[in-house]
């Protein structure tokens, strides 16, 4: 074989190896691209539509509903802040945390309920992990 034939065979063998094992050669590039895509997606505002039930007895609100979480293993915690503006504003802050165990990614509705004291004209807003939610009063 000549040097030219040896060179072509070597190039074909190298191309075959790169084609068969792309993660070995391109793994860090593919991983960094994937991370950038996740960062862009996490910066997008997600407006999940959340149907809620709202009860008001003249002084106290009880607000309940279901919010979608990424897995059945995620836990949900709630906190409420009422601001003394005119009219009063209530912010329901929902926070989801992944569980410790390995879990299938299946969107799972999780129930929440909060109560707070405010006037009849109070404005109610909610967030999930800092992203605003679109609250819709169910009939």
Image (cartoon, rainbow, N blue to C red):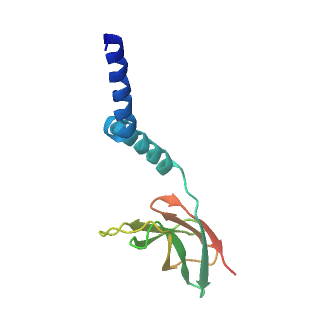
Residue at image point 44% right, 69% down: 71
- Image quadrant assignment for residue 120: bottom right
* Quarter of the image with the C terminus in it: bottom right
Q: Position of residue 67 (x, y in %)?
A: 52, 71
Which residue is the extreme one toward the bottom?
57
| Residue at the image point whose x is 53% and y is 66% from the top | 126
Furthest toward the front, the residue is 1
Q: Identify the image quadrant of the N terminus.
A: top left
Which one is in front, 92 or 52?
Answer: 52
Q: Is residue 37 left or right of residue 29?
A: right
Reply above or below: 61 against 34: below
Query: Going by the picture, which residue comes out furthest to the top?
Result: 3
Of the pair 96 and 63, the residue shown nearer to us: 96
Residue drawn at (36%, 66%), measured in percent from left and top? 98
Residue 100 placement (x, y as % from top left): 29, 68
Residue closer to the observer: 6 or 17 = 6
Q: Quadrant of residue 132?
A: bottom right
What residue appears at the point 33 percent right and 38 percent down from the top-left corner?
Answer: 28
- Above or below, 22 relative to 126: above
Relative placement, left or right, of 65 versus 80 is right
Residue 115, position in %: x, y? 49, 81
75 w.r.t. 7: above or below: below
Position in image of residue 46 (x %, y %): 55, 57
Q: Which of the pair 75/13 is nearer the observer?
A: 13
Left or right: 125, with 34 as reference point: right
């Amino acid at each position: 074989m000549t040097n030219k034939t040896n060179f072509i065979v070597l190039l074909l063998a190298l191309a075959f190896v790169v084609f068969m094992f792309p993660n070995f050669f391109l793994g860090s590039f593919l991983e960094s691209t994937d991370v950038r895509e996740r960062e862009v997606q996490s910066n997008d505002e997600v407006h999940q539509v959340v149907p809620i039930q709202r009860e008001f007895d003249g002084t106290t609100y009880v607000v309940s509903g279901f919010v979608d979480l990424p897995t059945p293993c995620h836990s949900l915690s709630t906190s409420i802040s009422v601001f003394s503006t005119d009219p009063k504003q209530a912010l329901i802050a929902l926070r989801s945390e992944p569980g410790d165990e390995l879990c299938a990614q299946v969107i799972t509705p999780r129930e929440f309920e909060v109560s707070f004291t405010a006037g009849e004209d109070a404005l109610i807003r909610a967030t999930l992990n800092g992203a605003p939610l679109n609250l819709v009063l169910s009939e």
